[in-house]
Image (cartoon, rainbow, N blue to C red):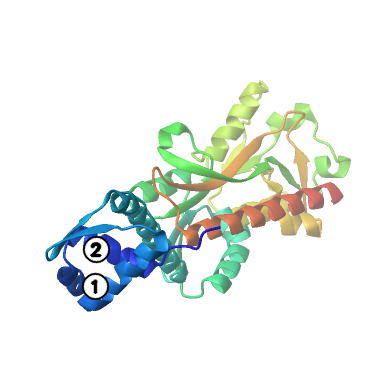
Amino acid sequence: MSEPLDSRQLRAFVTLANTGSFTRTGKDLFLTQSAISHAIKALEEDVGCRLFDRVGKSVALTPAGEQLLHYAKRILGEMSLARASLERLGKWGRSHLRLATSEAVCEALLPNVLAQHKEQFPQCQVTVSSADMSEAVDLLHNGHADLVLSLEPGPEAGVEFVPLFSDELQFLVSAQHPWAVARQVVREEIPTQPYILYSRSSFTSRLVEGYFRHEDMTLLTMMEVGSMSAIREMVGRGLGVAILAPWVARDEIAAGTLVALPLGRRKLIRNWGVLHRRGRRLNLGEEQFVSLCRREGAQLVGGSKAEAQAA
């Protein structure tokens, strides 16, 4: 394999090809004219052919020089890109990461993710806005958020979606509820239960309504509560039934105060991911954040399934 070309000689060669003058090249590169002449002579010896024709005080490229110039520009360009990339790498963690996500994700997924992120990027300033999906997408479009952790939106949202994990919505009932005692849901009783929902206008609520509409059921008795922790407390006290993913109540399920039961034979699956503006490339720090979220999400959903089955 041939030895690589000397980058300093290539730089002198490209500059001389542009200026046509040893004196001007020396000034541009802050070198003496003698140093430029030496670099060009060494490069010509290395490649084994003459690269310039000397005409008085000026120089002109030979055919071999024309060919080398094509490659030299590409080589130096790639080297500049490599340097810029490494400089960005060295600045990991010195930026500001603005996140927007739901209360449930803030509570269950983000603490571990942000703890790991801080270890890798201790100088990164992170701000988190708690918002439902439509509000979070608006923050993204308005330039007030960099990334959104959310359910997969429809194409009308006008954003790019990076998948993280999937979960399954289930009934959550207190340990004393007849369904929990029997370890099964009585289908005929589903429409008669008092339901506690997070928000009737939320994307999840629309998914739930669509699911039961397909089952020819209407959930008539409902209570709307704007706090996940309040919903878990109310369900635990026997005030109603919630329809949530088990990971939202993993501690209560593990403790045996709440029980998760399937909605039916047909599962209601949601896809979670990271949203960002279309056409925007994630920087290295953001890509690492996405990777941490994907790993934590898989552990969160997997652990919740195991706890629900054991309960």
Identify the image quadrant of the N terminus.
bottom right
Total number of numbered labels?
2
In this picture, residue 111 sits left or right of residue 133: right
Q: Position of residue 92 (x, y in %)?
A: 47, 68
Secondary structure of the residue carrying numbered label 2: helix
Estimate how packed mark 1 is, as few (under 14), some (14 to 19) or many (20 or more) residues with alpha carbons within 10 Å.
few
**What mark, if any, has residue 15 been given in the picture?**
2
Q: Position of residue 176 (x, y in %)?
A: 82, 49
Q: Tell me if label 1 and label 2 are in contact, CB under 8 Å.
A: yes
Q: Residue at x 12, y 64 (%)?
A: 56
> Which mark sits nearer the N-terminus, 1 or 2?
2
User: In this view of the protein, which residue sits in the foreground, 103 or 219?
Assistant: 103
Q: Disc 1 marks which residue? A: 29
Residue 137 visible, this angle: yes
User: In this view of the protein, which residue sits in the foreground, 196 or 29?
Assistant: 29
Q: Residue at x 77, y 26 (%)?
A: 188
**What mark, if any, has residue 278 been given in the picture?**
none
Vertical position of residue 309 compared to residue 190: above or below: below
Vertical position of residue 241 compared to residue 226: above or below: above
Vertical position of residue 49 compared to residue 225: above or below: below
